[in-house]
Amino acid sequence: MSPAKHDATAQSILTAAVSSIGSVGIARTTMEHVANLAGIGVATVYRRFNRKDNLVQQAIRYEAEQLLRVIEQQIVGLPTVEEALTEGFVAFLTEAHRRPLIRGIGDGNVVVGLPMIAQGGALLIEIGRTFAANIILRFQETGALPRFDPNPVAEIFARVGHSVCLAPDGLITPDDPFTARSVVRECLMPAITAHGTGPV
């Protein structure tokens, strides 16, 4: 569900849930805590989101879509698909690392990233895949790329980005845009250029 489709009360609840999950983790987030952060009654939270697992899922989607809106602003107007996907990937790693809910944080002995894999990992990959696929489709519509199904390639982008969020201490890190750009250009872009560079 897009942030624009939420009324002010729902947005307040989702913002509070994002804050709670990011600071104390999924396990310790309660409907009561979210209500207190939002400054509303807990009955209102239950009326809007019914159960905690539903609220968690919606909070993850809300935060992921907020993140993608920021990325979209950074890549708008870039003239090639390589630039758009490269800078979008770098912006995703940087911005996601700033958002505790997305990257997962330690909560004592409970790591937020682990329940996120089960409760939100597939959702984050779905949103990321759609975002990357829409970039490819945009360039297909201008004739800069031939027609092919963009979803398999887009899913690779989404899965690589998601894995970096969950394990940011490898060779690809959120604070090394040079390496991130190289990975896109040398490892991911060939999956697109293999289809050719013009319309068919």
Image (cartoon, grey):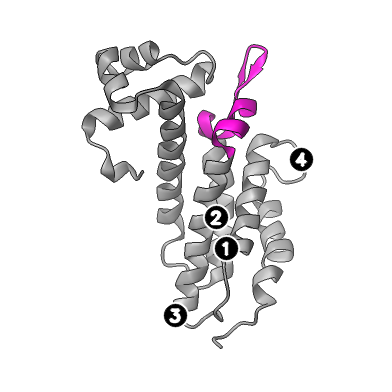
The quadrant in which residue 165 appears is top right
Q: Secondary structure at mark 2?
A: helix
- Asked if residue 185 is positioned above or below residue 131 in the image, the reply reads below
Mark 1 in CB contact with mark 4 (< 8 angstroms): no
- Residue pointed to by mark 2: 129
Which residue is under mark 4?
170
Task: List x then y, in percent, for residue 69.
Answer: 40, 49
Q: Earlier in the sequence, mark 4 or mark 2?
A: 2
- Mark 3 or 4: in front is 3
Marks 1 and 4, Cα distance to the nearest angstrom?
26 Å
The crowd level at tag 4 (other Cα within 10 Å; few <14, some 14-19, many 20+) is few
Q: CA distance from mark 3 to mark 4?
A: 37 Å
Q: Residue at x 74, y 62 (%)?
A: 187
Mark positioned earlier in the residue sequence (1 or 4): 1
- Residue holding disc 1: 151
Report if the CB atoms under discs 3 and 4 are less than 8 Å apart: no
**Span highlighted in magenta in the image:** 98-121
Query: Residue 8: percent from the left, percent from the top?
Result: 22, 32
Q: Amino acid at mark 3?
A: Thr
Please tell me how crowded label 1 is: few (under 14), some (14-19), or many (20+) other residues with Cα within 10 Å. Answer: some
Do labels 2 and 1 touch, CB within 8 Å? yes
Q: Residue at x 77, y 45 (%)?
A: 171
Mark nearer the viewer, 2 or 3: 2
Q: Earlier in the sequence, mark 2 or mark 3?
A: 2
Residue type indicated by callout 2: Arg
**Is residue 174 a member of the stretch shown in magenta?**
no
Which residue position is annotated with label 3? Answer: 142
